[in-house]
Image: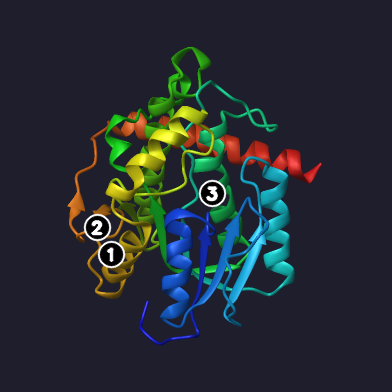
């Protein structure tokens, strides 16, 4: 990212609330073309020729495929991708219509599928891919046989898993020669709690004014990128410092990506029917 440059297109998932919305405003202010994607069909209220919005529910993989076709038909070329969409896992185990645990699909797999397809179709010619993670990533587990088992389900366990997986995805992209890093935004005021019960909404709204604002986090991420204070494949925090990642055996990582690759292929086969 360079200040004042309008020949760069940035795609932001989850771009109408929380950090995503703040990033959209920040990037537009700095002169970038911004494409936002969200489950809500209403775009951010901003009048700019540099802004496009697409509705896409990541909980429906046919929606993701439709988004990819629209971007392809619109001859839109993306330079920077920020995989930001996310939700705090539902109170109870919940499957999407695609048969996957809800937060696993929304927070991780659908965005990986989107990224892979954009890359393979040439819609994304990446200068950089940023995957938004969380401080909770340290509690995640790469063993998908347990992570996707309803018997092992828990709100924070499931959420932590997805945020670990986003961090692992940046490492994988870097290994493949694509510039990428994961971002640990810390605790801040956002809208990820929409699946929670009313009491949680109430408590969150009380706490939100005392949290770091989404706008501040967006400013921090923008500064990290502009000042090139990131390390390829690693996780960076708001201060541009590397966040240590849990260590796993190569066998654990290989098994994890083998399962994910099979899931992506299954998605392709179902959608092509």
Whether residue 8 sits left or right of residue 121 in the image: it is left
Q: Residue furthest right?
A: 273
Q: Which mark is residue 220?
A: 1
Residue at the disc numbered 2: 238
Q: Residue at x 47, y 38 (%)?
A: 193
Q: Nearer the viewer, residue 173 or 162?
A: 162
Q: Quadrant of the C terminus?
A: top right
- Callout 1: 10 Å neighbours few (<14), some, many (20+)? some
Task: Judge whether 90 appears above or below 71 on screen.
Answer: above
Q: Residue at x 27, y 34 (%)?
A: 138
Give SS at disc 1: helix
Q: Which mark is residue 111?
A: 3
In space, the residues marked 1 and 2 are separated at their CA atoms by 5 Å
**Closer to us: mark 2 or mark 3?**
2
Task: Judge whether 175 appears above or below 153 on screen.
Answer: below
Cβ atoms under marks 1 and 2 closer than 8 Å:
yes
User: Mark 2 vs mark 3: which is more N-terminal?
Assistant: 3
Residue 11: horizontal and vertical position, in percent? 53, 65
In space, the residues marked 3 and 1 are separated at their CA atoms by 23 Å
The part of the image, by quadrant, that contains residue 62 is top right
């Amino acid at each position: 990212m360079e200040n004042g440059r309008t020949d760069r297109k940035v795609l932001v998932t989850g771009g109408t609330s929380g950090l995503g919305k703040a990033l959209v405003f920040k990037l537009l202010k700095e002169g970038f073309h911004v494409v936002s994607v969200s489950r809500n069909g209403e775009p951010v209220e901003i009048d700019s020729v540099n802004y496009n919005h697409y509705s896409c529910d990541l909980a429906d993989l046919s929606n993701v495929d439709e988004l990819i076709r629209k971007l392809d038909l619109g001859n839109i070329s993306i330079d920077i991708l920020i995989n930001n969409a996310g939700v705090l896992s539902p109170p109870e185990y919940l499957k999407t219509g695609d048969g996957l645990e809800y937060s696993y699909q929304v927070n991780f797999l659908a965005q990986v599928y989107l990224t892979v397809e954009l890359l393979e179709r040439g819609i994304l010619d990446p200068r950089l891919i940023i995957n938004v993670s969380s401080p909770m990533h340290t509690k995640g587990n790469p063993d998908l046989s347990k992570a996707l088992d309803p018997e092992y389900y828990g709100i924070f366990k499931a959420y932590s898993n997805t945020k670990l997986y986003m961090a692992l995805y940046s490492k994988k992209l870097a290994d493949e020669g694509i510039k990428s890093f994961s971002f640990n935004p810390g605790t801040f005021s956002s809208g990820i709690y929409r699946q929670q019960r009313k009491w949680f909404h109430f408590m969150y709204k009380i706490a939100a004014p005392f949290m770091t604002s989404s706008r501040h986090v967006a400013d921090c991420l923008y500064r990290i990128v502009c000042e090139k204070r990131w390390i390829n494949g690693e996780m960076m925090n708001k201060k541009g410092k590397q966040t240590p990642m849990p260590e796993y055996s190569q066998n654990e990582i290989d098994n994890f990506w083998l399962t994910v690759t099979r899931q992506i292929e299954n998605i392709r086969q179902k959608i092509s029917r």
